[in-house]
Amino acid sequence: MNNLLFITKNEGKVREIRELAAPHGITIEQVGYEYPELQADTLEEVARWGAIHAAAIFRRPLIVEDSGLFISSLGGFPGPYSAYVHKKLGNKGILKLMSRIKDRRATFKSVIAFCDGSSEPVIFSGSVEGEIANKIRGKNGFGFDPIFLYGDKTFGEISRDEKNKISHRRVAFERLIRWLLEHRDVQTI
Ligand code: IMP
């Protein structure tokens, strides 16, 4: 079985990526190393820089993932600042910011950077469209899941299996797998 290094401290992301990787015969080895996050305007830049930094340290092919919630009526906020905003405001804070706003459209975006240490990182992205709910709903998932409405349920109300069928992370990860199948011997990622 192949093994792919995933550099992240976020256990929620690891659980999802592990389940997405398993059907492809890939196991995920997590390293809870906190690489310095570049203060940048795009997830792509943050992920690319993180992958270069981590590959120089671990000297093995690896992935990092940067993701975020982009709220249309707030000009895409919190976007690349999602982790910080979630820590400071939480889901309650976002609902408060949105309390008088009618346009509740939002997008989750995931960017995965793969780096083997010898060439430029390769970037894969995925997104899913939804809305900001009116209240916190459900206990599943992590981060903004309980306020991200997809159809009539929030990501906090659906199982990990269901989320993994439609999520931003799934789209980005499947793009990575397709690329690996084309460009690498997947037996020896
Ligand atoms: P980062 O990718 O480590 O910078 O963190 C992104 C932040 O966005 C996380 O701390 C979560 O709060 C949020 N986030 C990213 N992906 C998801 C998701 O799938 N569900 C809920 N929140 C997410």
Image (tube, helix red, strand yellow):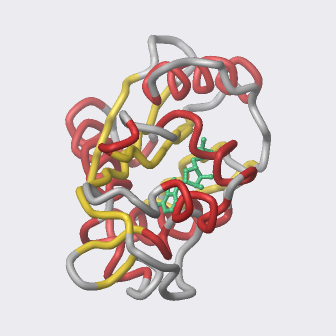
| Residue drawn 69% across the image and 26% down it | 37
Q: Nearer the viewer, residue 111 or 119?
A: 111
Labels in figure, total = 0
Measured as percent of width and height from the top left, residue 21 is found at 41, 62
| Residue drawn 20% across the image and 77% down it | 151
Quadrant including the C terminus: top left
Q: Quadrant of residue 20?
A: bottom left
Q: Nearer the viewer, residue 90 or 65?
A: 90
Answer with left or right where residue 10 lies relative to residue 106.
right
Q: Residue furthest top?
A: 119
| Residue drawn 41% across the image and 75% down it | 134
Measured as percent of width and height from the top left, residue 25 is found at 39, 65
Q: Is residue 182 above or below residue 8?
A: above
| Residue drawn 65% across the image and 24% down it | 55
Q: Residue furthest front?
A: 100
Q: Nearer the viewer, residue 31 or 78?
A: 78
Measured as percent of width and height from the top left, residue 107 is found at 31, 51
Measured as percent of width and height from the top left, residue 135 is found at 48, 79
